[in-house]
Image: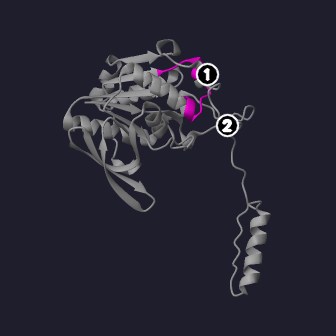
Amino acid sequence: MKFLVCIKQVVDAAKTEVDLETGRLKRNNANSITNPVDLNALEAALKLREQVGGSVEVITMGPPQAEAVLYDALSRGADKAYLVTDRVFGGADTLATSYTLSEAIKKIGIPDIIFCGIESIDSNTAQIGPEIAATLGMADVSAVSEMKYAKEGFLMVKRKSGDDVETLELKLPAVVTALAELNKPRYPSIKGILEKKDKEIVKITSNDMDIDLNRVGFKGSPTQVKNVGPVAAFKKENLHVENKPMEEMVDMVYEIVKKLSLV
């Protein structure tokens, strides 16, 4: 079987810096890491490979320095990696990103299972996995907390929705997005670290795909982040509303909400 894991290079939340002139996050290798829950997705693929055989490949979209997260995945046991990189892909929102990744996946061959982390720590949209599935016309299950290969062509998964847990039989090929509780990611091995440079990272650009350039990058993104900055400090206040007539308590709460500009 062939498993493909989508991973992302993100800014480490503990080292986040904002460019005061542009209002954008500073992104460089010094403060970048693999999106944490993407490692759970990778671990799920590696465990399935151990169970049923096959190969585990990883893919990311980003600038050349995003190779760092691909080498990390290779050192953890992935067999092959793809870097989707091109200046025209810059500034992409989730719609443009999922379209670009989907076209790259078509080029390298549709796998049996595509794994993604449930969301990235830098945008928290939880949209990429489902959007890739929709673009490729594949089934998908998000927020997976347990998983096992049940029988040929099917995966048994448990997905969380609030406090509820749903058990599903998922027909392959399909897309799965992983929760952090799905497993505990393994560390890079000494052997993996030594051998990662010998494994292949294939670069894919816009010239390598039959792609609509109006649907990629900034141009193909209907949503835009205009500015990013630190949250202003605020004074915390506690107010107890009790032992008063109901109408008076409702009026007090309404005035508080109105003061906070929520109505």
Find disc 2 in the rendering and name its residue.
225
What is the distance, in whole Å, between disc 2 and disc 1 at their CAs? 19 Å
Residue at image point 54% right, 22% down: 63
Frontmost residue, 212 versus 55: 212
Q: Secondary structure at mark 2?
A: loop
Quadrant location, the N terminus: top left
Identify the image quadrant of residue 234: bottom right
Query: Start and end of the magenta stretch?
Result: 84-96
Quadrant location, the C terminus: bottom right
Residue 168 vertical placement versus 84 (above, below): below
Q: Secondary structure at mark 1?
A: helix
Going from the N terminus, do you reach mark 2 or mark 1 first? 1
- Horizontal and vertical percent for residue 27? 59, 30
Identify the image quadrant of residue 30: top right
Residue 169 vertical placement versus 60 (above, below): below
Total numbered circles: 2
Residue 37 vertical placement versus 88 (above, below): below
The question of residue 93 being in magenta is answered with yes
Find disc 1 in the rendering and name its residue.
214
